[in-house]
């Protein structure tokens, strides 16, 4: 995805956890959105999750947050293990389980962790991958939250 691209529709989930199925229209229009990709086999994702949770909680009511579980191997597709990891790492936001790579492909995402920040109109304003840069991510989120 390129900056200013429109947020893809949330189609093709294997399962939604922590929520009923959501659509793009449920998320955009009045709040910015953070979409974060993670995987149960990703140690970097596990280490980053407290920071993601902190952002989620800091901007509660001002930012919609959706986690996307992106399997990196067949072993990552076990729903029981995904539920266990979500509970263990306090992932309370809606989780789009993407065992068929539908949303992963729509985002052209190839890495975890990955973060996509959309403004309230659903335009991509920031994206980043990897373990570093949480200060930058927080600044970008702060900027789009305060534009509303």
Image (tube, rainbow, N blue to C red):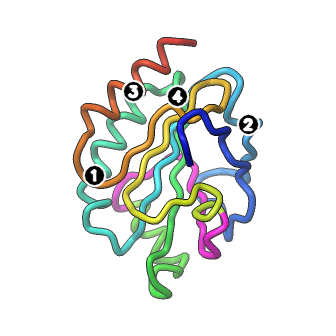
Q: What residue is at 36 percent from the left and 34 percent from the top?
A: 55
Q: CA distance from mark 1 to mark 4?
A: 19 Å
SS under mark 2: helix
Q: Residue at x 43, y 70 (%)?
A: 84
Which image quarter is the C terminus in?
top right
Residue bearing mark 4: 63
Dot 1 alpha-carbon crowd within 10 angstroms: few under 14, some 14 to 19, many 20 or more: some
Q: Residues within 10 Å of mark 3 (few under 14, many from 20)?
A: some
In the image, which is nearer the foreground, mark 3 or mark 4?
3
Q: Which residues are magenta?
A: 88-102
- Earlier residue among tags 3 and 4: 4
Whichever of labels 3 and 2 marks the residue nearer the N terminus, that label is 2
Mark 2 or mark 1: whose residue is earlier in sequence = 2
Residue that mark 2 sits on: 26
The tally of labels here is 4
Describe the element under mark 1 as helix, strand or loop.
helix
**Who comes first in sequence, dot 1 or dot 4?**
1
Quadrant of res 25: top right
**Quick check: is 25 in the magenta stretch?**
no
> Which of 140/4 is in front?
4
The residue at 73%/65% (across/down) is: 12
Cα gap from disc 2 to disc 1, whole angstroms: 26 Å
Residue 48 badge: 1
- Residue occupying the far top of the picture: 147
Q: CA distance from mark 3 to mark 2?
A: 22 Å
Q: Is residue 23 above or below residue 120?
A: below
């Amino acid at each position: 995805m390129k900056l200013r691209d429109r947020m893809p529709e949330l189609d093709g989930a294997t399962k939604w956890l922590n929520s009923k199925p959501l659509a793009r229209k449920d998320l955009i229009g009045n709040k910015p959105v953070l979409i974060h990709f993670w995987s149960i086999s990703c140690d970097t994702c596990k280490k980053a999750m407290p920071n993601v949770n902190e952002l989620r909680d800091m901007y509660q009511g001002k930012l919609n947050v959706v986690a996307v579980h992106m399997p990196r191997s067949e072993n990552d597709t076990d729903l029981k293990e995904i539920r266990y990891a979500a509970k263990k790492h306090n992932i309370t936001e809606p989780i789009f389980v993407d065992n068929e790579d539908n949303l992963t492909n729509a985002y052209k995402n190839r890495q975890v962790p990955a973060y996509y920040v959309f403004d309230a109109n659903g335009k991509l304003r920031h994206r980043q991958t990897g373990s570093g840069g949480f200060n930058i991510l927080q600044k970008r989120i702060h900027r789009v939250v305060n534009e509303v």
